[in-house]
Amino acid sequence: MEKKIDNLEKRVSNLEKEKSSKSSNLTNLSGLQKLLVEKISKIKPQDLVILILYSTPKQTKEQIQNKFQSLGTSKKMLNWFKGGNFKQRLIDTGLVFEDGKNDDGSTYSLTEGKGTQKAISIIEKLKTTI
């Protein structure tokens, strides 16, 4: 009986640790969202796509464009999606990859190495600029 209780205590402890780490990630993401809104005029379109995919992976181009609009970007930044910018500047350089398909089309995510590192460097740069 004691062995079962110890086992249950360990499992509860692990679940509590997971919950606290997830809530700290959510805090960081809400901080990222706040940073994006504050510095939106200083962010390049391709960097903004990287940050959007960093906060929420597996998005379609349309979902990314909708996020652009909700953040209050200019029409010029929305026009960045016309033509081959997305493919040439993000996919071909190894920052973003096609991460499956859903009913709305192809979904995209950051690559774990290059894409995630780029997102972190952009965040650090935004934090240090006033």
Image (tube, rainbow, N blue to C red):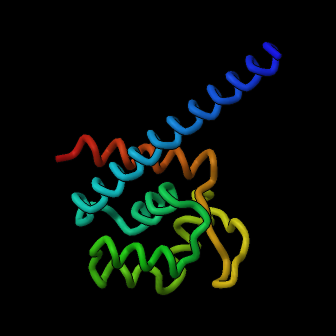
Q: In terms of image quadrants, where is residue 90? A: bottom right
Decide if residue 53 is on the left or right side of residue 30. Answer: right
Where is residue 106? Give x, y as percent.
Answer: 67, 77
Q: Is residue 21 above or below residue 30?
A: above
Given residues 108 and 55, the one toward you in this image is 55
Given residues 126 and 66, the one toward you in this image is 66
Given residues 83 and 40, the one toward you in this image is 40
Q: Is residue 42 above or below residue 2?
A: below
Residue most extreme to the left: 130
Q: Residue at x 26, y 62 (%)?
A: 37
Q: Name the image quarter holding the N terminus.
A: top right
Q: Residue at x 27, y 75 (%)?
A: 72
Q: Is residue 21 above or below residue 109?
A: above
Where is residue 99? Give x, y as percent.
Answer: 69, 65
Where is residue 11? Give x, y as percent.
Answer: 70, 28
Residue most extreme to the top: 2
Residue most extreme to the front: 1
Where is residue 31? Give x, y as percent.
Answer: 33, 49
Q: Residue at x 30, y 84 (%)?
A: 75
Decide if residue 21 is on the left or right side of residue 32. Answer: right
Q: Residue at x 54, y 78 (%)?
A: 61
Q: Is residue 126 above or below residue 12?
A: below
Given residues 24 and 53, the one toward you in this image is 24
